[in-house]
Image (spheres, rainbow, N blue to C red):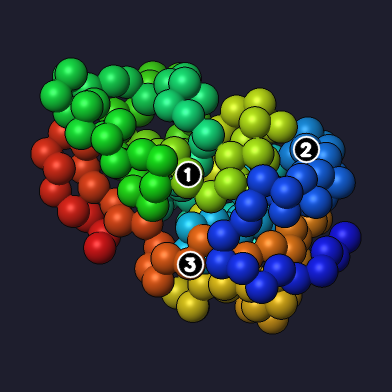
Amino acid sequence: MRLPPLNQNLLTKQQVGSHAHALRLARQVLTAGGVIAYPTEAVYGLGCDPRNGDAVNRLLALKQRTVSKGLILIAADFAALQPFVLPLNHAQMAAIHASWPGANTWLLPAHPSAPRWLTGDHAQVAVRVSAHPLVLRLCDMWGGALISTSANQAGRRPARTALQVRQRLAHLPQLIINAPCGGARRPSVIRDGMTGRVIRN
């Protein structure tokens, strides 16, 4: 399904509501184990059910990305991320929560039950609470966290529009939600939750 493009960088509540049909379709695709593309703060992301290994394999094949690198989880609140991570101490978690919602991704110790495709060859899971209103609604409708990795083949420039998703992927996801990204110039900063060290600026 394709929706008319919006000119604004940020969506109002009314505009998010105008995408209600696309969001319902997205929930159906995710439930069926499919892959969607959706706008985030800076670039388009590819997403799927983080607990569905077949769906993750489809996503990795679209992106031509190795499972060893791990994947980012995005959510509407920290509660949706808790099943995948172990909390840090109070001061560390306070700094993390103070950065959300927003384009700030944190590496937290993986919960013992977190699937390997989320951690890759690491002991941590990358997580973020988004500030993008459409992502918040998407996660609410889905009822939990989603995988969020840039919509491009590995090593190539990420897509910033629905059209670029179509141009930069050899094979397309089951659904592309056509809406503007949040206006950030770069993908989210990634920091180590234990040390605060910047991993990706």
Q: What residue type is labelled 1?
A: Ser
Across and down, in percent, residue 6 comes to 71, 68
Question: Front-most of 95 and 174?
Answer: 95
Percent position of residue 190, x then y: 29, 52
Numbered label attached to residue 183? 3
Q: Quadrant of residue 184?
A: bottom left
Q: How far from the left and from the top, in percent, is residue 7?
A: 66, 73
Q: Which of marks 1 and 2 is in front?
A: 1
Describe residue 33's horizontal placement relative to residue 40 as left or right.
Answer: right
User: SS at mark 3?
Assistant: loop
Q: How crowded is mark 2: few (under 14 residues within 10 Å), some or many (20 or more)?
A: many
Q: Which residue is drawn at 83% across and 40% down?
A: 24
Q: Is residue 53 visible?
A: no
Q: Which mark is residue 163?
A: none
Q: Residue 27 carries which label?
A: 2
For the image, the number of numbered tags is 3
Which of the 4 image quarters holds residue 25?
A: top right
Residue positioned 34% across, 48% down in the render: 104
Compared to 182, does 67 lie above or below? above
As drawn, is 39 to the left or to the right of 20? left
Name the amino acid, label 3.
Answer: Gly
The quadrant of the rendering that contains the C terminus is bottom left
Q: Which of marks 2 and 3 is nearer the N terminus?
A: 2
Residue on which disc 1 sits: 130
Q: Is residue 153 above or below residue 139?
A: below
Report if residue 163 is visible in the image.
Answer: yes
